[in-house]
Amino acid sequence: MVIMYINIINPSVNSLDGQESRYFPPHIVGFAMRFMDYFARCQIINLPYRKDRAAMMAKELQQADMPIDGKHVMLFPGIRPTAAEPFPSIGAHGCFMSHLGVLRQAYADGLANIVVMEDDLALPTNFTEVAEGLVAELADTDWDFVYFGHILELDRNDGKPRLQAYQGKIMTAYFFAVNGKVLGRLLAFLDELLQRPPGHPDGSPMHVDGAYSTFRLQNPDVVTLVANPCLGWQRSSRSDIYPNQWFDRWPVTRELAGLARRIKTLLRDR
């Protein structure tokens, strides 16, 4: 059997009957697609001063056959506000605005879909082969959200990697994709959250993973899929959202803590 790969650089510029289609689905019959052959763009949210995380992500993605190229796979400069209000913390505020920035850019560029990663993502060593099967499944499926990374406890059944529908809340938002056809509604919802006072019954400024879950729960027609088993997890790293421990506040102990986290991640990857 001969497997042929097609590189779909930007599915959003494909046309149907001679006219441009903003959300033309990249469906290829009879060909195997790599992960980034299916998706129009992948952006990794990274605070500019976290060069340690940027370096780790570059290595991680290179090994997964989707190197950062600045066009198809690229870093997004994370936002670090000066104040927490009206969010629970400065980190939560910055995380929300960073995700919002990625989605706004994808919508403005008319992308067919967008993969969002956070810079503490770790991928399994067999990512390429597992992702290939999931992408083939995704190409034949109607979807709006796909969570490739999550912390859900799911039944494995036959143990074969697959995508399955999920309607509940999902904590974390470190590795997921959004279909272009739902981006407009999602952006309108996120903008509405920013305008509401804290505690509003329909939702107000909150952690971004909670915002996505609230949107999905308030829009039951939105189709959410999750990878089973998950295709990525968050590596051990100093947090930019929650207050850091004392050993992350001093240069010498911070380096030692970073070394310990890298060792922990390597042991988990084995």
Image: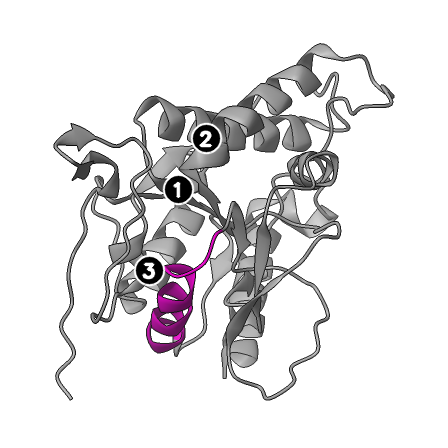
The rendered magenta stretch, by its main secondary structure, is classed as helix
Q: Tell me if 26 is positioned left or right of 217 in this view.
A: left
Is the residue 73 above or below the residue 16 in the image? below
**Mark 3 or mark 1, which is nearer the start of the sequence?**
3
Select label 3 or label 2 by which is in front.
2
Q: Foreground: 120 or 39? A: 39
| Residue assigned mark 2 | 103
**Mark 2 or mark 3, which is nearer the start of the sequence?**
3
Question: What label sits on residue 61 in the rendered view?
Answer: 3
The amino acid type found where label 1 is placed reads: Ile
Classed neighbour count for the residue bearing mark 2: other residues with Cα under 10 Å, few (<14), some (14–19), many (≥20): many
In the image, residue 55 lies in the stretch drawn in magenta: no
* Extent of the magenta region: 127-142
State how far apart marks 3 and 2 are (Cα).
21 Å
Q: Tell me if 92 is positioned left or right of 32 in this view.
A: right
SS of the residue under disc 2: helix
Q: Which quadrant of the figure contains the N terminus?
A: bottom left
